[in-house]
Image (cartoon, rainbow, N blue to C red):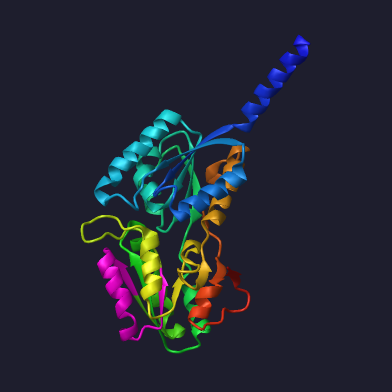
C-alpha cells in the first residue's frame, strides 16, 4: 500500500512539473480590462493551457500620463526580477520600447505582439543574448477604405480617420499616411488623419464631419483622451458618444469597436487571434525551439465583421462574405 501511495505521489510530482515546464511573464502596455488585452490574454491562455505558469503585469499606459511610463516600466522589470521567467511576452508598443532595453541581455526568450512600429532599430541598438520573435500589428487601412467605398457606392469619397494621441496611435497614423500616399491616386478617396488629445477636440471633430462633406469616419484608437481637467475619459464613453452624435457612418479597425452603439463594421484585427498565435509560439519554445529561429511575422490579414443594427441604422448593406453580429 505504501509503495502504491509513493508511486501516486511521484506521478503527481512528475505530472505537475511537466504541466508547468516554463514560467511566462506577460508585460501589458495597457491593462487587463482593456478589450484588446483581455482578448489576447484569453487567446494565449487557451493555446498554452497548463503547459506554463503565466503571470501578468500592467504598465497601464492608456490611463496614466506619459511622464509615468518609465516608472511603470521599472515596476514591470521588478516583477521580472522577482519571477525570473523563461519567456517574456511584450504586449504592444510601449512594453517593447520601454522594457526591451531592460531585457535585451537577459537569458530569456521574448515574444512581442501588437507592435505597430518597426522594431529593427531597437534591436540593433541593444544587441544581447535574449532571443526574440513576435508579431507585428498593422491597421488594415487599404482594405477598409476599399470596402467602405464598396458599401457606400460613391466616388469620389471623403473619409476621416480618428485616433487619440497615444504612442500606438501616432505610429499607426504614420503608417496609414504612408499607405495613403502610395495609393491615393488609384483609390479615388480623399483621406484625412486626425490625431486628437482631448475629449473636447474629439467631439468637435466628429460634429464637424458632416458640414465638411465627410462620407464616413474610420474610428481608430480612442483610449488616451482626457477631459478638460486632464483626467482620462473611459473609452466606452467616447465610443458611445461618437455613435450617438455622428451624422456620418462609422467604421472601425479593431473588433472591440464594432457592435450596437459602436461602429458599423470593418475588416478587423482581433486580439484573440494574435494571442493564439503567440500561444502557439510559446508552445514551440517550451518544446525546445529557439525564438530567433522563428521568423517575425505580420499578424493575420483581418476578418470582415459588421453590426446588423448599425448597418440598418445607416441604411447600408454589408458586402457578401462579411460576418454579422447581433
| Residue lying at 65% horizontally and 22% vertically, measured from the top left | 13
Q: Nearer the viewer, residue 87 or 254?
A: 254
Q: Position of residue 32 (x, y in %)?
A: 44, 47
245 is higher (above) or lower (below) than 300: below
289 is higher (above) or lower (below) than 199: above
Q: Quadrant of the N terminus?
A: top right
Can you name the residue that lies furthest to the top here? 2
Q: Position of residue 233 (x, y in %)?
A: 31, 58
Q: Is residue 106 left or right of residue 6?
A: left
Q: Nearer the viewer, residue 316 or 274?
A: 316
Q: Residue 285: name its quadrant.
A: top right
83 is higher (above) or lower (below) than 10: below
Q: Magenta span has 133?
A: no
Q: Quadrant of the C terminus?
A: bottom right
Q: Is residue 265 left or right of residue 246?
A: right
Can you name the residue that lies furthest to the left here? 229
Q: Nearer the viewer, residue 116 or 181?
A: 116
Q: Nearer the viewer, residue 185 or 91?
A: 91
Q: Residue 283: name its quadrant.
A: top right
- Looking at the rendering, the stretch of residues picked out in magenta corresponds to 193-219
Can you name the residue that lies furthest to the bottom here? 155
Q: Can residue 156 be seen at all in this image of the molecule?
A: yes
Q: Can residue 174 be seen at all in this image of the molecule?
A: no
Q: Magenta span has 207?
A: yes
| Residue lying at 48% horizontally and 64% vertically, measured from the top left | 254
Q: Position of residue 21 (x, y in %)?
A: 60, 31
Q: Is residue 150 left or right of residue 100?
A: right
- The mark tally for this picture is 0
Q: Position of residue 75 (x, y in %)?
A: 34, 37
| Residue lying at 44% horizontally and 46% vertically, measured from the top left | 90
Q: Is residue 68 left or right of residue 150?
A: left
Amino acid at each position: 500500500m505504501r509503495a502504491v501511495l509513493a508511486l501516486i505521489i511521484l506521478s503527481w510530482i512528475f505530472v505537475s512539473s511537466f504541466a508547468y515546464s516554463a514560467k511566462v511573464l506577460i508585460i501589458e502596455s495597457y491593462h487587463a480590462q482593456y478589450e484588446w488585452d483581455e482578448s489576447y490574454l484569453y487567446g494565449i491562455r487557451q493555446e498554452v493551457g497548463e503547459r506554463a505558469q503565466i503571470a501578468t503585469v500592467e504598465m497601464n499606459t492608456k490611463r496614466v500620463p506619459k511622464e509615468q511610463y518609465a516608472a511603470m516600466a521599472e515596476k514591470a522589470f521588478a516583477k521580472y526580477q522577482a519571477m525570473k521567467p523563461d519567456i517574456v511576452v511584450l504586449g504592444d508598443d510601449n512594453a517593447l520600447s520601454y522594457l526591451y532595453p531592460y531585457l535585451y541581455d537577459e537569458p530569456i526568450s521574448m515574444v512581442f505582439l501588437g507592435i505597430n512600429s518597426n522594431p529593427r532599430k531597437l534591436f540593433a541598438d541593444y544587441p544581447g543574448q535574449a532571443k526574440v520573435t513576435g508579431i507585428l500589428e498593422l491597421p488594415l487601412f487599404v482594405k477598409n477604405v476599399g470596402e467602405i467605398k464598396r458599401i457606400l457606392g460613391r466616388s469620389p469619397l471623403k473619409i476621416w480617420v480618428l485616433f487619440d494621441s497615444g504612442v500606438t496611435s501616432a505610429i499607426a497614423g504614420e503608417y496609414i499616411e504612408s499607405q495613403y500616399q502610395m495609393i491615393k491616386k488609384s483609390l479615388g478617396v480623399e483621406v484625412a488623419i486626425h490625431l486628437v488629445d482631448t475629449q473636447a477636440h474629439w467631439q468637435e471633430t466628429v460634429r464637424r464631419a458632416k458640414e465638411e462633406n465627410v462620407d464616413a469616419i474610420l474610428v481608430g484608437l480612442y483610449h488616451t483622451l482626457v477631459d478638460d481637467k486632464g483626467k482620462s475619459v473611459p473609452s466606452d464613453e467616447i465610443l458611445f458618444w461618437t455613435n450617438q452624435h455622428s451624422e456620418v457612418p462609422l467604421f472601425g479597425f479593431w473588433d472591440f469597436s464594432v457592435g450596437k452603439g459602436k461602429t458599423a463594421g470593418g475588416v478587423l484585427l482581433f486580439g484573440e487571434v494574435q494571442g493564439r498565435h503567440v500561444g502557439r509560439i510559446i508552445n514551440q519554445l517550451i518544446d525546445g525551439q529557439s525564438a530567433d529561429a522563428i521568423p517575425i511575422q505580420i499578424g493575420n490579414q483581418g476578418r470582415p465583421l459588421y453590426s446588423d443594427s448599425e448597418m440598418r441604422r445607416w441604411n447600408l448593406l454589408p458586402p457578401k462574405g462579411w460576418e454579422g453580429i447581433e
